[in-house]
Amino acid sequence: MIRLFAAAALFACALILGQAPALAQANLANPASLTERAPATYKVKFDTSKGPFVVEVNRAWAPNGADRFYNLVKSGFYDNVRFFRVISGFMVQFGINGDPKVASAWRAAQIKDDPVTQSNKRGLITFATAGPDTRTTQVFINFGDNAALDRQGFAPFGRIVSGMDVVDALYADYGEGAPRGRGPDQGRLQAEGNAYLTRDFGKMDYIKKATIEK
């Protein structure tokens, strides 16, 4: 009990001294500390450069994905993050943190796959993957009905419940990423962060803040 009171007192002091952001940043750089179980359903509001949209997450659809997304949002991981891959008619992808140190900390923080219980239809949100059990922080929102992704193990965990028009309006002219397209190179994005995108892809839309709705 004494330790709990001491921790609360330290956090209160941090708030007074303006150090709360520093504490949050420290947690953000330590994926192992962010493993809270998500509620059965919850909503996330994304305030973006194009306007707001809201995602409703259903934990029963993909528990591991829902838990990871919940912790990422609560920790502020998606704040000031760019929509770095926007392919009209297919999907929009985001989830590489703009701070290379934070992005690096999460690259190996993989979660187990979930069974695919929902189809990748328009408006559903899904974790990106590079193979079995490799999901980390990147997610995508389906622009179209992409049922072919279901057979590849992409498990939706939520859906857009308002603001799909905002998602549709995200800047898409950069298209596919390098080297296949004119968009950003993911390796450079991981290494250089938002500085790279701001310099070379200035029209790219971004998330101002993502919050769990009460």
Image (cartoon, helix red, strand yellow):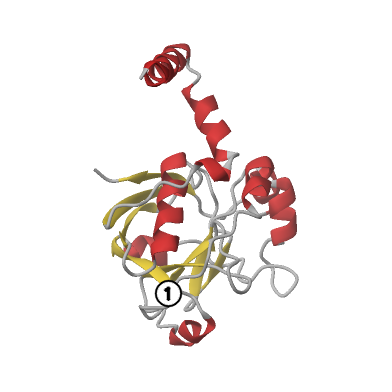
Q: Residue at x 75, y 71 (%)?
A: 179
103 in relation to 9, above or below:
below
In this picture, residue 152 sits left or right of residue 57? right
Residue 57: which quarter of the image?
Answer: bottom left
Whole-percent x, y for residue 165 in the image: 33, 65
In the displayed structure image, the side of residue 34 where residue 2 appears, left or right: left
Q: Residue at x 65, y 54 (%)?
A: 107
- How many numbered discs? 1
From the viewer's perspective, is residue 122 above or below residue 2?
below
Secondary structure, mark 1, is: loop
What amino acid is labelled 1 in the image? Phe
Looking at the picture, tell me which residue is in the foreground, 2 or 35.
2
Q: Visible in this render: residue 140?
A: yes
Estimate the x, y position of residue 114 in percent, counting from the top left.
45, 71
Horizontal and vertical percent position of residue 16: 42, 12
Please state the horizontal and vertical placement of residue 3, each as a whole percent of the image: 42, 19
Question: At x 37% / y 60%, what residue is drawn?
Answer: 166
Which residue has dot 1 on it?
A: 143
Crowd around label 1: few <14 · some 14–19 · many ≥20 (10 Å) = many
In the image, farthest residue toward the front: 1
Residue 94 or residue 167, whichever sits in front: 94
Quadrant location, the N terminus: top left
Q: Is residue 48 visible?
A: no
For the C terminus, the image quarter is top left
Q: Is residue 44 above or below residue 164?
A: above
Between 6 and 91, the residue placed more toward the observer is: 6
